[in-house]
Amino acid sequence: MKADVLIVGGGLMGFSTALHLAMRDTRCIVLDKGSPGRHASGVNAGGLRQLNRHPAEIPLSVVAADMWRHIRELVDSDCDTRFPGQVRVAENEAELGRLEKRAALTRSLGYQHEEIIGPDELYALVPALAPHCIGALICRSDGYGRPFHALDAFRRKARSLGVYYQADTRVDAVRQDGDEWRLSTLQGEFRAPVLVNCAGAWANHIAAMLGEPVPLKPGAPMMMVTERLPHFIDPVLGAAGHKLSFKQMQNGTLLIGGAHMAELDLLQERTEINWQKLALSARSVMTLFPQLKDVRIVRTWAGLEAFMPDNIPVIGASVTASSAYHAFGFSAHGFQLSPVVGRILSQLILDGTSELPIDPFRIDRFASSGRCA
Amino acid sequence: MKQHYQLAVIGAGPAGLAAATVAAEQGIEVAVFDGQVAPGGQIYRAMESIPQHRGSQLGDEYQRGRELVSAFRASSAKYFPETQVWSLNGRREIGLLLQGQAHTVTADQVVICSGAIERPVPFPGWTLPGVMNAGAGQILFKAHGIVPDDGVVLAGSGPLLLLLAWQYLHAGVSVKALLDVTPMINHLYALPRLPRALLAGHYLTKGMQYKRDLKRAGISTLHNVRSLRAQGKDALQSVSFLHRGREQNLETAVLLVHFGVIPHTQLGRVAGCRHVWDESQLCWRPQLDEWGRTSVAGILVAGDGGGIGGARSAEHAGRLAALQALYALGTLDRATRQRLARNDRKWMREESHIRPFLEAFFRIADDMLQVADDDTLVCRCEEVSAGQIRAAVADGHRDSNQVKFLTRCGMGPCQGRQCAEAVSHIVADASGKALQDIGHYRQRPPVNPLTLGQLAGLHSEKTE
Ligand SMILES: Cc1cc2nc3c(=O)[nH]c(=O)nc-3n(C[C@H](O)[C@H](O)[C@H](O)COP(=O)(O)OP(=O)(O)OC[C@H]3O[C@@H](n4cnc5c(N)ncnc54)[C@H](O)[C@@H]3O)c2cc1C
Ligand SMILES: Cc1cc2nc3c(=O)[nH]c(=O)nc-3n(C[C@H](O)[C@H](O)[C@H](O)COP(=O)(O)OP(=O)(O)OC[C@H]3O[C@@H](n4cnc5c(N)ncnc54)[C@H](O)[C@@H]3O)c2cc1C
């Protein structure tokens, strides 16, 4: 089967790229070894956070935030997004000092979306919070969405514009034959002049096939969701002193994550909850919201995600092969970036350049540090 | 509590009691975890405390449990009652809740003896207060002697429905009607299986006796009932149905329904054991070998949790699993395992004669399993209707997990226990795929209630 662009990976990155390419009349094939949303894109926490991003990600994140606000124009669905802001609370002076420094850094880069708030505003925003907090970093335009619904909307829209998607089709080998990429799968060969690697936690395998190994480490952040509770908190809440992300969803359930990792078996694509570590997330919640101690946990799970040593993604052209591109390694914060990543890749592919600064995401940045042989 | 056991048995019904007793006899360290206050499981519930007269109302089969329970009590197995298992994983790490305190323990071998649950079959009005599972009614009766005082209507299918009607009759409860939804056509399909069933004739004679007793007491049993519907505003007021082509209506405040039982598979699924669709029993069950071994090393399943076989069969399966666990631990050699297994294997085969007949005879009609009525709620936790599930399928979502992600069906507090089978049926029917390919929900822990505070207080010797 032939097209203009072949995309390996039917997560949000793959579909966002396909969608942006299709909007410019480019024919794409998206292949996924599993079913839609089986991995990071379908099971993540849905946080739409500019707050506390790595400085290199800020320009992309700010554009992405704007795209999420108008997401209906892009995918005909609001993806259940809400924008009640995100806060990162400080429980002592040292933490507040760190947050103030951070706010100053963001301002010095010319961005205004992060501010410090004092206890009065914090408790007005989050009255349910335990009384010992002394302030917070806030990004008022942040929020959250529902990942599976977002993925579904991206996929639907992409397909309506002619994108061809095939599930249960694993790319086993790639090779370039003249001007054409050929992907082998058990379901046959796929061909196109351009190749895009959006293979998530498995993207290093595709990169290695292109002769550019990367120090990607798969990880499986754990999540838990509780029974429904009456509405009591609007913003998404994190804390300077805890690995925690805490939000109350539209339906009243609490979605709690904390970047603590499950045991994982990449080959079997199975994860197993590490209860000792998940207990740390529960303890963080108890510190900040002790009144929630009798709330029932309904479900816990973990999702497979690609982590890079510097916790920022690889986005851009291959340096070893022509007409090949990468977008992976989002290190547990790629949901928010997904609309803009698709736009960037479409521009790189069709225009040869992107208006956003993506140099920090070069794939060859690891080579010099000697981290990959 | 100890961190590690050689053998952990989950469930103290006939399967678990037999497994633990046999294993403890060989001198290994056995722990038995069970959610109930006393040993006995479903069928021998409250065995030790029940007054003699109520025991006889429950039938003599019930007395058999006394032996099983006292042998277990006399054994060295460490028994943890009122202990909920909320998690089990492939490394045989077991999450427990004991007096409000969460623990994790590990075991070299684990035998899951979690028994059966009643098959949830959604039908119009099934979520109205006043509509209850017959099993819940039976539990109230067995454990607390509570019976509905204003009379009941019983509806559904299966031997237990009959048994319950009979038990109610003997406890003086007015049974207004017994509505049997099993399609008549089943008689035809069941017929070829009758000769083999006659080998276990005592079950059939018992069933006939129940029927005779009910008839003599003037309880009307309507067969081939269709379009069952529970009606009422805020609570059940009446039951309507089609019988012999006529729409009928019965006023009642209590409707007890029962559509047979299916294996309680949550623990095995959460541990990653492979499950298969059983077309005869119309349910998911773990794939097991002749000893009860699952696809996960060191995890076995015995009793109704591995496929419905009844209480006696569960006992035998429990012993076989224990023998295998002892063999795996190096306590028994191969020849001894084989020798000790001989009788149980034989008796288990005898027990199985009746099954194909029962399964064919009591098979629920497809339109009920597939929840023909679009407005009927399938997932009562997340309020997802059959129509929404069919719409998701029409939309290209073609397995149970996809449908779950999209509709939230099965994501509520019951973790899909109430809707997993129905969703499999609906999706298979709507997509034209085989049930085996539809898959079942990926099960996520905890499978039993656990609070944030309890998880925060998780006790464990090994910390980070
Ligand atoms: C638990 C969790 C919580 C998170 N929370 C947030 C959050 O709150 N906010 C946020 O912004 N981000 C969050 N993230 C991160 C975010 O989900 C990811 O960064 C993002 O979804 C990555 O998208 P992707 O398309 O690269 O990956 P995926 O969705 O994993 O897609 C990659 C796809 O490639 C396929 N694939 C791989 N190899 C092959 C092959 N050889 N052939 C065919 N197909 C292949 C895989 O099957 C997979 O479907 C979270 C992640 C997790 C796991
Ligand atoms: C509602 C109902 C009523 C029944 N009534 C009868 C009857 O009257 N007569 C009859 O012949 N058969 C009856 N049966 C069938 C009968 O249950 C089985 O044939 C028999 O009890 C199977 O034995 P078992 O050991 O496999 O499981 P069970 O006897 O069901 O024992 C399973 C035990 O495991 C425990 N358990 C399960 N999961 C967990 C967990 N996560 N943590 C802790 N403990 C757990 C349960 O509490 C239970 O004590 C009934 C079944 C059901 C579902």
Image: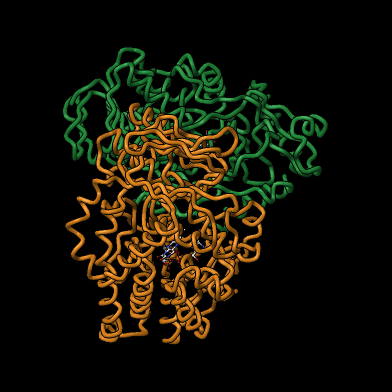
Q: Position of residue A113 (x, y in %)?
A: 66, 23
User: Relative to B59, is B377 above or below?
Assistant: above
Q: Position of residue A228 (x, y in %)?
A: 61, 40
Occupied quadrant, residue A94: top right
At horizontal 41% and vertical 76% (from top left) the residue drawn is B19
Chain A, chosen colour in render: green
User: Relative to B74, is A312 above or below?
Assistant: above
In the rendered image, the quadrant that contains the C terminus of chain B is bottom right
Please tell me in which quarter of the rendered image ligand 2 is found.
bottom left
Occupied quadrant, residue A252: top right
Task: Report if residue B140 is visible in the image.
Answer: yes
Task: Report if residue A329 is visible in the image.
Answer: no
Chain B, chosen colour in render: orange
Q: Is residue B213 left or right of B57 when viewed as pictured?
A: left
Q: Position of residue B424 (x, y in %)?
A: 35, 42
Q: Is residue B108 left or right of B80 when viewed as pictured?
A: left
Q: Viewer-proximal residue, A189 or A207? A: A189
